[in-house]
Structures are given as C-alpha cells and as structure tokens.
Amino acid sequence: MTRVLVNAYERNPAARRACLAHYGYACCVCNMDFERSYGIHGKEFIHVHHLVPLATIGDAYEIDPIEDMRPVCPNCHAMLHRPDPKRPLPIEGLKNIIAQRTKTADNG
Ligand SMILES: [Zn+2]
Ligand SMILES: [Zn+2]
C-alpha cells in the first residue's frame, strides 16, 4: 500500500487543471500513462507533484502550475517524497535512479 503525503498545492484543483492542460497526463518521471495502460478506466488519472520544497516557501508564495508542478504517477510520487515529505527529490534525480537501474538490468 502506497501512501503519499500531498501538500496543499497538490490538492488545489485549479493548479492541477492548469498543470495537466500544459503537460498532459503521462508521468514526467517514467512516462506511465494510465489511459494507455487501462483504457477508459485510467483516463485522466495522474497525480500532480509540487517541485518546490515546502520548507523554502514563504507566506507570499504564488503557485505557477507550469513552473512548479509536474504530473507524476503514484509510484514515482511516492518515491519523490520518500526521503523527506517536505523536501522531495528533484524529478531529474529520480529519473537518474531509474536510468541507472535500467542500465544495470541491461548488463545482466
Ligand atoms: Zn512514474
Ligand atoms: Zn508531491
């Protein structure tokens, strides 16, 4: 069972809509697309992740859904938040981890 601690920005429906209108519904880390895998049942299912560590956000912070948010699948979302929910891994960092794993698997 995967638990992900989402923050207030990730629960904001207007921010989510704007983010997904720009990026689409495929995971920015692993390219998982729920509609491709699950058909109509998976249509428009994806999490949105807020890139900016909450600890660095001041009171006057205004969200930019395209700069500050990315669609991610629930697995990648959980991995991004795993080290510390308040200081997620960068997207590129998690992509690199997956790339390393794939390379290792290819080499046997
Ligand atoms: Zn993913
Ligand atoms: Zn997140």
Image (cartoon, rainbow, N blue to C red):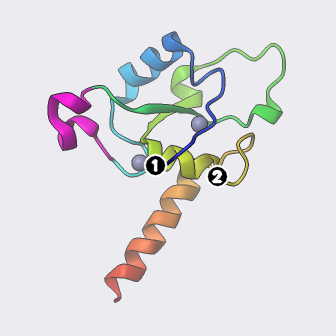
Q: Residues within 10 Å of mark 1 (few under 14, many from 20)?
A: some
Task: Residue at 45% x, 16% y: name it.
Answer: 18
Using the numbered discs, state the Cα–Cα distance from disc 1 to disc 2 in whole angstroms. 10 Å
From what the image shows, is residue 10 above or below residue 92? above
Mark 1 CB near ligand 1 (8 Å cut): yes
**Badge 1 vs badge 2, beta-carbon distance below 8 Å:** no
> Which secondary structure lies at badge 1?
helix
Q: Residues within 10 Å of mark 2 (few under 14, many from 20)?
A: some
Query: Could you tell which of marks 1 and 2 lies nearer the N-terminus?
Result: 1
The boundaries of the magenta stretch are 32-43
Callout count:
2
> Which secondary structure lies at badge 2?
loop
From what the image shows, is residue 77 above or below residue 12? below
Say which amino acid is labelled 1.
Answer: Asn
Mark 2 CB near ligand 2 (8 Å cut): no
- Position of residue 82 in the picture relative to residue 108 (left or right): right
From what the image shows, is residue 81 above or below residue 8? below
User: In the rendered image, which quarter is residue 36 located in?
Assistant: top left
> Where is residue 66 drawn, in percent x and y?
51, 25
* Label 1 sits on residue: 75
Does 42 lie within the magenta span?
yes
> Where is residue 82 drawn, in percent x and y?
64, 52
Say which amino acid is labelled 2.
Answer: Arg
Marker disc for residue 82: 2
Task: Residue at 36% x, 19% y: name it.
Answer: 21
